[in-house]
Amino acid sequence: MTRRLTTAQAIIRYLKAQHVARDGNRQAFFGGCFGIFGHGNVAGIGQALEEYPEFPYYLCRNEQAMVHTAAAFAKMSNRLRALACTTSIGPGATNMITGAAAATINRIPVLLLPGDIFARRNVAPLLQQLESSSTQDISVNDCFRPVSRYWDRIQRPEQLLAALPEAMRVLTSPAETGTVTLALPQDVQTQAFDFPEELFAERTWAVARNRPDACLLAEAAQWIRTAKRPLIIAGGGVIYSEGTDALASFAKVTGIPVGETQAGKGSLTFDHPQSVGAIGVTGTSASNKLAHEADLVIGVGTRYSDFTTASTTAFQNPTVRFVNINVVELDAAKHSALALLGDARVTLEELQGAIIGHAVSSTYACEIAKLRATWEKEVDRIYSRRIGPPLSQAEVIAILNSELQPRDVIVNAAGSLPGDLHKLWRTREPKSYHMEYGYSCMGYEIAGGLGVKMADPSREVYVLVGDGSYLMMAQEIVTAMQESIKLNIVVLDNHGFSSIGGLSRTCGSSGFGTEYRYRNNGEQIAVDFVANAASLGAHATRATTHDDLKSAIREFRDRKTTSVVVVETDFNDRVGSYDSWWDVAIAEVSTSVSVKDAYRNYEKARQNERRFWPQSG
Ligand SMILES: Cc1ncc(C[n+]2csc(CCOP(=O)(O)OP(=O)(O)O)c2C)c(N)n1
Ligand SMILES: [Mg+2]
């Protein structure tokens, strides 16, 4: 039995039939397709989407944004659901590259379907075609190769029989997932073929919970028993595996403290007795002190980015060693670790079973409790500070933290907010903190908020966005209005790049090029964000004082559509860092005294960077 369909129709029919199941819970994998049409896809994928309205199509405003939306949707769904993204050829396609990189780096599934140049070639060069004198087998879509976990170009309809299952295998694999790109030449999209009916049968992809090697698990248990100062680092893998309860129990029973990465924040509620909060460059005093002296680091579902390891300076115990629980071999092996290759949840459960009766010493437990209390006091101090107007960014965070419900979700990605939120946000529910910090991509915020809300419409979503990020990508407010997807957006207007301005100063420079000022008179550029947001269709208001912001947030809850509040914040009032350091390379020679000083300090600080070798017994 065959069915005669175009390549594009076959793709959409196939995507509609794909399901995933984990722990026996089965659901459709795709929530639909975002896109912008052009000559490269309108008559192919566009025609197919029109023919299959049960596979919903969403028109967005920018191709980069829709990939962020798709990634946020998948992240919020613990990678068990995804969205497809279709574009024309040329600029529509390459606009997705930033989003593709962000998804792959964050290990989040997205399916990209960029249009491509004619496979038959006779009419080349096409509008928007990249030409090469050395080959005709190239197009701008080859730029997706390094940022995709699976990349293919479909030159003949029947290649789908091999390509589509591979695409699904990678998308649904916890270890391999990321961006999958199927480049679709515009003529091939429209070509018909007699596809076997079996291709379109409902298929369920089992998302396995792999368990680690039993011998290595026993060895890891032994390492934990003999450790004096163990520390857990909880990464995104804890949350994606729905392992937060397993971690809470493991930490409670063993007394081992838990620091969280950006992707792992929310693994424990902030008031769990073993929660020491954010770790690394943007970490808490408690986490970072414990990391400094830890003799055993148990990394669960973490990539050990430089922000997590403070550029490898976080762990200074000379004999520190690592046990890494991860589904990805690359991550499990980092820092010469004893690698437990497996799903975070089941591995933690098995490990807990292997160390029954073991707990950290009472001296260590006391120290943890004290460090926790000191940190909580510090947050209270920062939360209760009142400056301005303009308000401090920390005060805005404090207001939101007290006004939001535990299940509400905050969304953020770049600027000075990620660091402040990582440290200060008191998380009360695992999926309530949504930070894109693998790529820290300005522009993710509003587009990502859309994906979060689509993944779980039952929750209020609060997008926190700096003025810089807003100016890069605010247009998806129109998409939110079009789809009646409600976002609550807080724009923090500090007239420029506070984060990079501060960084520039710590590098001995002057904040060069980081403030929004007119060239001719140096005056601040006052962008009217309220008018801007209102022009896109949102309800928009300004908050100047503490009380203004509080009442705006309260009022938003009862609104049905997207609202924006713009609050001016102080450019220079920053939350400090706590016993941590980040390697940002500084000019080795300069005529500036402050740059020379910064370089000297930098050279000294770099001496704390470590390479971790295997440690015996
Ligand atoms: C797409 C992109 N371009 C550049 C950067 C580098 N960068 C990081 S933060 C930042 C400034 C962000 O400004 P804003 O959103 O106003 O936040 P603020 O720093 O003021 O808190 C820049 C330019 C980035 N992360 N992403
Ligand atoms: Mg700013």
Image: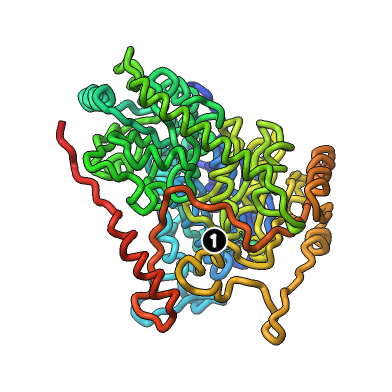
Mark 1 falls on what kind of element? loop
Q: Is residue 426 left or right of residue 293?
A: right
In this rendering, the count of numbered labels is 1
Residue 256 screen position, x and y as percent: 39, 26
- Dividing the image into four quarters, tell me where ligand 2 lies: bottom right
- Residue closer to the observer: 446 or 138: 446
Q: Residue at x 42, y 65 (%)?
A: 142
Residue 535 point in image, percent of width and height: 82, 62
Residue 85 appearing in the image: no
Residue that extends furthest to the top in the rendered view of this protein: 357
Given residues 147 and 557, the one toward you in this image is 557
Residue at horizontal 59 percent and vertical 35 percent from the top: 427
Vertical placement of 229 versus 399: above or below? Answer: above
Q: Quadrant of the C terminus?
A: top left
Q: Which residue is mark 1?
A: 96
- At horizontal 52% and vertical 38% (from top left) the residue drawn is 265
What residue occupies the far bottom of the structure in this picture? 520
What amino acid is at disc 1?
Met
